[in-house]
Amino acid sequence: MNGDEVIGQDGAMARLTQMAENNKLPHALLFTGPEGCGKMAVALAFASYLLCDGSKRINPNLNIANARAMAERMEHPDLHFTFPTIKLPSMGSAHQPISLDFIKEWNKFLKNGAYFTFNKWMAAIGAENQQGLITGAESDELGKTLSLKSCLGGYKVSVIWLPERMNATSANKLLKLLEEPPSQTVFLMVCEKPELLLDTIVSRTQRIALKGIDREEMERALVERRGLEPVEAERIARIANGSWTKALETLDTGNENRMFLDMFSMLMRLAYMRDIKELKKWSDSVSMFGREQQRRLLTYFNRMFRENFMYNFRKPELTYMTTEEENFSKKFSPYINEGNIIELMELTDRAYRDIGQNANAKIVLFDYCLKLIVLILRK
């Protein structure tokens, strides 16, 4: 991957390459910023730079054309990936999963681009309700791999995606690697929640804090890369709010949010009609979702409550909805008002919390439906 594929982060790319060219490159970088801003894209583009132009300064004999070809395919022998994994039923009871167990799936996943989410990766490896982790065995394997000499005589680059998902054993072993890094090795850590990392790990990295993608940059990318008309690109860019992954999800005709809108509109209609029997069926059907999907659904509901409340002010700059969501809100928004907005959002937050704490989803969701009847009909 090269820098041309990165959207709206020219400043960060320029800063990184300048550090390398001035021989001021730290051995560990921590990429942070809002989801979808392009942290992984920047990390992969910089990894390609280090493995090609950067390595050429270390090894003048490097065949740079060959190095670029391998880096472009993300198959460079000095590029090493660490990412969250799950334990498959086929694995032995004593086996701790490592990234190499899923490297084929990972390489295939990366071919779809550097803008993706944790949930998409979990779906790609069939995680269902499992929580992806980086195990202690992963850090052991990484230490062994990085202790070897560079295959092409240049940099060795370790890209660690979501280091906050390391278990305690893995985190402590990584800390030792950062304290005594192997020669010619650069760690590129792509983090969504740096507050969950060990302070000692953070202190041994230099943070590269990225901002959300500028709206004009995103509009331009939507027009040039996705073929949108400028008017539609402007709407999508406003909804995405600096996140390219959110923009892509909004464009995806089969995306989850379209299903969530259907579930939301059905629920609001049934609550308005006080149809207890159908509300029970609705809650039973949603209880069949995985817990994480149930929580994403509730997060979407809270966003729709907020957007419908703001829609009543008739100021387009205050709302962030797709065309389908706005069409629904034209008739529904009057039912979300000063008399119920706070309680609606608090009710949804409680359901989100209870499901996260492994409460019985059928009970939580049916109770949620019944309380909605009172709130939706309140004026």
Image: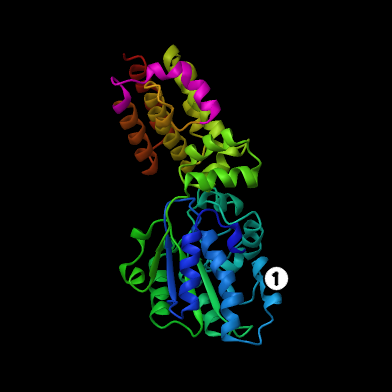
Verify whether residue 273 appears in magenta: no
Residue found 50% across the figure and 77% down from its top: 21
Q: Is residue 355 left or right of residue 327?
A: left
- Can the viewer see residue 161 in this picture? no
Q: Main secondary structure of the magenta part?
A: helix
- Residue 337: horizontal and vertical position, in percent? 33, 20
Q: Which quadrant: the N terminus?
A: bottom right
Q: Is residue 338 left or right of residue 114?
A: left
- Which amino acid, mark 1? Ala
Q: Crowdedness of circle 1 by 10 Å Cα count: few (<14), some, many (20+)?
A: some
Q: Which of 320/356 is in front?
A: 320
- Can the viewer see residue 32 in this picture? yes
Q: Secondary structure at mark 1?
A: helix
Residue found 36% across the figure and 74% down from its top: 204
- Residue 176: horizontal and vertical position, in percent? 39, 79
Segment tinted magenta in the rendering = 322-342
Q: Is residue 61 left or right of residue 355?
A: right
Q: Which quadrant: the C terminus?
A: top left
Q: Which of 182/362 is in front?
A: 182
**Which quarter of the picture shows residue 346?**
top left
Q: Which of 53/47 is in front?
A: 53
Q: Which residue is mark 1?
A: 69
- Residue 244: horizontal and vertical position, in percent? 53, 47
